[in-house]
Amino acid sequence: MSPQEVRDWVRAARRIVLLSGAGMSAESGVPTFRDAQTGLWAKFRPEDLATEDAFRRNPSMVWDWYAMRREALRQVEPNAGHRAVAAFQQRHPGRLAVVTQNVDGLHQRAGSPGVLALHGNLAADRWLDAPRACCDVAVLRTGSPPSCPVCGNLRRPAVVWFGELLPAAELAAAEDAAAACDLMLVVGTSGMVYPAAGLARATPGRVVVLNPHASDLDDAADAVLRGTAAALLPLLLEEQG
Ligand code: APR
């Protein structure tokens, strides 16, 4: 399949879902999940840090890892892929839904409306344990992580850690969108993590994988485009003449 043939599928599609993973943000300078971690964090695997157990065992280390990632995010911008998606949504309201595994908020910053963020949002925090009356974000004890000065409840990143349930409302909306679409663009994901990857196997729509490398969802695809998000999405989504 050529990008031009897939572009024809886009033009014919009434309901499109874009399912994105870390590769969507690679050209913004955000390392993908399974790239080797760099620097101080090189000796850790995300799977060893992004868990509630890891956080309870060593809250300051896990908090600092997220603080480093938040700081890194402040330096990056949405790329041409994010912008092409948001521009398409602008021109065709309601025709394309974004479902993302990314917690970097770049689809949202590019202007995409109604992004279904299945794994949460790196920029937000929540309470580690169910908040009590004393747990008030207006009076936090500062620290890494911040905490409630009365009961010691810790703040944690509002992301979905390994082994945790996905936000039910977002997942249900993503499943509904996948069930109703006639085209799903699967962009920048290794397809290794469920239930997100399962959306590409459950949809009745045509599935197109956009990835410079082989992925676990290639076998579920009606077409595979070997290329990057920032190069391919403008080709597929930009209005022709
Ligand atoms: N454009 C498109 N795809 C790219 C690009 C690019 N420029 N660069 C890399 N990729 C592809 C890689 O080939 C890989 O298949 O992006 C994919 C990134 O895969 P992962 O790093 O596994 O990220 P992802 O699939 O999003 O991981 C899913 O797993 O670790 C958990 O919760 C975490 O959301 C994450 C989930």
Image: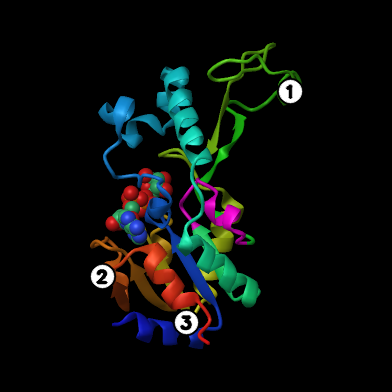
Residue 169 can be seen, yes or no: yes
Going 51% across and 47% down the picture, which residue do you hit?
Answer: 166
Label located before the other in sequence (1 or 2): 1
Residue 101 point in image, percent of width and height: 46, 52
- Disc 1 is placed on an element classified as loop
Disc 1 to disc 2: CB gap under 8 Å: no
Extreme residue in the front direction: 241
Distance in Å between CA atoms under marks 1 and 2: 49 Å
Residue 127 point in image, percent of width and height: 61, 28
Range drawn in magenta? 100-112
Residue 202 can be seen, yes or no: no
Going 41% across and 18% down the picture, which residue do you hit?
Answer: 57
Residue 200 point in image, percent of width and height: 40, 67
Label located before the other in sequence (3 or 2): 3
Q: Nearer the viewer, residue 158 or 142?
A: 142
Tell whether 91 sits left or right of 103.
right
Quarter of the picture containing the N terminus is: bottom left
Tell whether 129 sits left or right of 82.
right
Going 55% across and 20% down the picture, which residue do you hit?
Answer: 145
- Disc 2 is placed on an element classified as helix
Q: Is residue 52 above or below residue 226?
A: above
- Pointer 3: what residue? 10
Give the numbered dot on residue 219. 2
- Disc 3 is placed on an element classified as helix
Extreme residue in the left direction: 214
Q: Nearer the viewer, residue 180 or 183?
A: 183
Give the numbered dot on residue 31. none
- Pointer 1: what residue? 136
